[in-house]
Image (cartoon, helix red, strand yellow):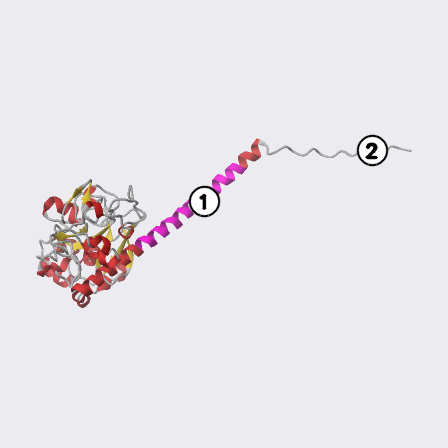
Amino acid sequence: MPRMPSVRYPRSRAGFTLVELLVVITIIAVLMGLLLPALNGVRESGRQTVCRNNQYQLAFAAIRHAEQNGFVPGWRNTGPAGGTSPWTIMLLPFIERNDIYRTVDATGIVPVANAAFVTTFVCPSSPPDSQTGPTLAYAGNCGAVQNTRRFEGVMLDTSTTSGRLAMDEIASADGTAYTLVLSEKCGPGGPENTVPASWNMQISGFIVPGPMGNINRQLSASFGLSGSPPAGKIINSGTAAHPGLWSQPASNHPGGVVAAFCDGHTEFLKDSLQAPVYAQLCSWDHANAITASGSTGSYGTWTGAYRVLNEGDYK
């Protein structure tokens, strides 16, 4: 009987060759390179949403303050127990932090032991070094000159009667939907262009009872305009030429800042925003601000002649 030929089966391969392994690694690297920017974009979009929500809550807190007290909280206010308090302290009862507000002392500040971290005051794209101190990422619109030309900003010096501005006044002029109340001020630039301070005006352990005097004004949680517009960008300018009280908004969001308006809605202001538009968004009564500033005032320097603001100028 003839023998049947033996059948040979191919040996199973032990694994990838070096070339195949390099190809797989290359493909994974390419996919990661494509996916990471998309993931970062999604993460940043989420952070902007949180930032918008924070400012939405703070803007409506300012609205409720105005409804209850008859005026928008100022960059300087008479504290609940005397002294002077920044707008941040005045909004605490309206963001359900009465527990902190009740501890405000006769100088107008919260004692250091009670100065807690409040997430509503912090942008997630600008995280603090720790979550134990009273960090602040936002600033109030104080315009150019707070009380002598009260048309140029919203958060005035309410410790004087002349500095008290009602929401109805804003609504009857340029409109609450076209006037800024808050913005971020925590992005690029030196100390003059940021607010490393707490809502209690605390910087490196030094607490001041409100933005009074030259050095305290440097620490003020406010934004506005001063002198002539910078040669570069208005938003995220990173310049120290317009320090402290009047420096422009800045953030760590790419391309602009989140800002809130007096009616409570928020917008993303691009860093391509033009100086006249920015100044007009700060003013609640553009026609009177132009007249009051004259040819030498900062507001007139930033805006020029009278113009009607178009939504497309800043959206």
Q: Is residue 150 left or right of residue 22?
A: left
Rendered image quadrant of residue 112: top left
Task: Give coordinates of residue 70: x percent, y percent.
Answer: 16, 65
**In the image, which disc is placed on residue 215?**
none
Q: Is residue 252 magenta?
A: no
Q: In this orientation, which residue lies closer to the viewer: 187 or 296?
A: 187
Q: Nearer the viewer, residue 67 or 307?
A: 67
Numbered disc 1: secondary structure: helix
Q: Disc 2 on helix, strand or loop?
A: loop
Query: How many residues crowd mark 1 within 10 Å: few (<14), some (14–19), many (20+)?
Result: few
- State which tag comes first along the sequence, 1 or 2: 2
**Disc 2 designates what residue?**
5
Q: Position of residue 162 (x, y in %)?
A: 9, 60
Give the quarter of the figure containing the C terminus.
Answer: bottom left
**Quadrant of the image containing the N terminus:** top right
The location of residue 279, given as percent across then percent down, is 18, 55
Place of residue 98 in the rendered image (x, y in percent of width and height, measured from the top left): 23, 56
Residue drawn at point x = 20 percent, y = 61 percent: 65
Relative to 5, say whether 122 is above or below: below
Q: Specify the amino acid type for callout 1.
A: Leu
The residue stretch that appears in magenta? 24-52
Q: Does the image show residue 57?
A: yes
Q: Considering depth in this image, is 114 or 117 the residue closer to the camera? A: 114
Mark 1 near mark 2, Cβ–Cβ under 8 Å?
Answer: no
Q: Which residue is mark 1?
A: 34
